[in-house]
């Protein structure tokens, strides 16, 4: 039986989308971690890029919550050497989030992922005015 082209394309798109959907449990459907986390938090894919959020335990505010936009996030970062700093943010009620854009060096191509990270955080009730932590190449 021949499958109509539209049905085939629809089935293919559903398969591809469902196989790449990731929850906040830091694991793909294969069980591999999306990101090595130095603190409890959420890691998931956003537009195909690993994103993480370290969130304070108790936050009295529902919207406009403070956060640090950590850039650039690479597979190894944030790492154990920065754990103390991130713990201080969390103790002060400030979340930390970032998205892996690779070795972008300020490239305009990375902007769409950084914008997506920002929109995701605002959608989750975080402030529209984060503090940017430009780590290494992320400072570009």
Image (spheres, rainbow, N blue to C red):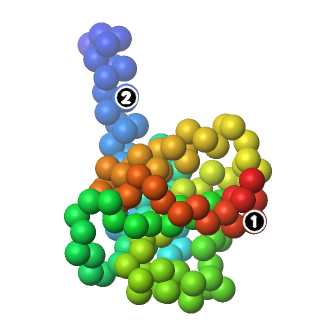
Q: Is residue 57 above or below residue 16?
A: below
Pointer 2 residue: 12
Q: Which quadrant does the N terminus fall into?
A: top left
Q: Position of residue 35 (x, y in %)?
A: 52, 67
Q: Which comes sooner in the sequence, label 1 or label 2?
A: 2
Q: Residues within 10 Å of mark 2 (few under 14, many from 20)?
A: few
Q: Please give left or right for residue 78 compared with residue 55 in the image.
A: right
x and y percent of residue 138 in the render?
Answer: 69, 58
140 vs 130, left or right, is: right
Is 5 on the left or on the right of 110, as rendered? left
Alpha carbon separation for disc pair 1 and 2: 40 Å
Residue at screen point 23% across, 75% down: 60
Residue at 49 percent across and 86 percent down: it is 88
Total marks in image: 2
**How far across and how far down the image is residue 93, in percent?**
37, 79
In which image quadrant can residue 121 be found? bottom left
Of residue 73 and residue 129, the one placed in the foreground of this image is 129
Q: In the image, which disc is placed on residue 18?
A: none
Q: Would you say the residues marked 1 and 2 are in contact, meaning their CB atoms lie under 8 Å apart?
A: no
Say the numbered circle drawn on residue 136.
1
Would you place residue 63 above or below residue 93 in this image?
above
Q: Callout 1 environment at 10 Å: few (<14), some (14 to 19), or many (20+)?
A: few
> Looking at the image, which is closer to me, 60 or 75?
60
Q: Residue at x 41, y 46 (%)?
A: 119
């Amino acid at each position: 039986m021949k499958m109509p082209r539209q049905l085939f394309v629809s089935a293919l798109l559903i398969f591809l989308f469902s196989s790449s959907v990731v929850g906040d449990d830091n694991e793909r459907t294969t069980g591999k971690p999306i990101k090595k986390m130095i603190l409890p938090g959420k890691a998931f894919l956003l537009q195909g890029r690993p994103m993480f959020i370290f969130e304070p335990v108790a936050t009295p505010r529902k919207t406009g919550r403070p956060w640090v936009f950590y850039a650039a996030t690479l597979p190894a970062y944030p790492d154990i050497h920065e754990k103390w700093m991130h713990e201080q943010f969390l103790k002060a009620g400030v979340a930390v989030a970032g998205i892996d854009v690779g070795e972008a060096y300020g490239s305009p191509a990375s902007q769409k992922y950084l914008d997506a990270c920002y929109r995701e955080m605002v959608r989750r009730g975080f402030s529209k005015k984060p503090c940017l932590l430009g780590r290494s190449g992320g400072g570009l």
